[in-house]
Amino acid sequence: MTSTTPRQRTGWAENGGQYEYRVLTIDRSVSRHDAVRLLTDEAEHGHWELERTRLYVGGERRVWLRRKIIRVRSTL
């Protein structure tokens, strides 16, 4: 039997990091293949990652994407 311990959260977000969010609404007329292609392009070119997806009764999809906000500090 293995014991499970809660994960220690020492990640980037817990150390004051912030995310930028983007919500996409995909119409029911868009095929699943095209929606996957759209999200893949956003991930590869915009550095977005998938946060959440919701499928609504009418067939509409709502997708939340997020990416890290990187603040550049002056070294002068």
Image (cartoon, grey):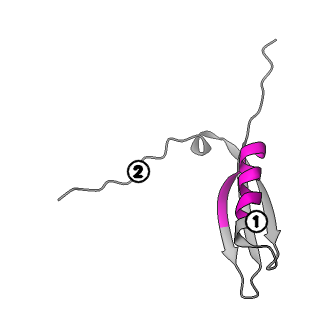
Span highlighted in magenta in the image: 34-52
For the C terminus, the quadrant is top right
Which residue is the site of mark 1?
A: 34
Q: Secondary structure at mark 2?
A: loop
At a point 80% along the width and 65% down the height, the residue shown is 24
The answer to whether residue 26 is above or below residue 43 is below
Which residue is the site of mark 2?
A: 7
Tell me if mark 2 has few (under 14), some (14-19) or many (20+) residues whose alpha carbon lies within 10 angstroms of its own: few
For the N terminus, the quadrant is bottom left
- Specify the quadrant of the image occupied by residue 55: bottom right
The residue closer to the viewer here, 53 or 28, is 28
At a point 76% along the width and 55% down the height, the residue shown is 21
At a point 79% along the width and 57% down the height, the residue shown is 22
The answer to whether residue 60 is above or below residue 63 is below
Tell me if mark 1 has few (under 14), some (14-19) or many (20+) residues whose alpha carbon lies within 10 angstroms of its own: few
Between the residue at mark 1 and the residue at mark 2, the CA separation in whole angstroms equals 36 Å
Q: Could you tell me what secondary structure mostly forms the magenta stretch?
A: helix
**Residue 27 on the magenta span:** no
Q: Secondary structure at mark 1?
A: helix
At label 1, the amino acid type is Asp
The residue closer to the viewer here, 19 or 50, is 50
Percent x, y for residue 74? 81, 19
The residue closer to the viewer here, 2 or 42, is 42
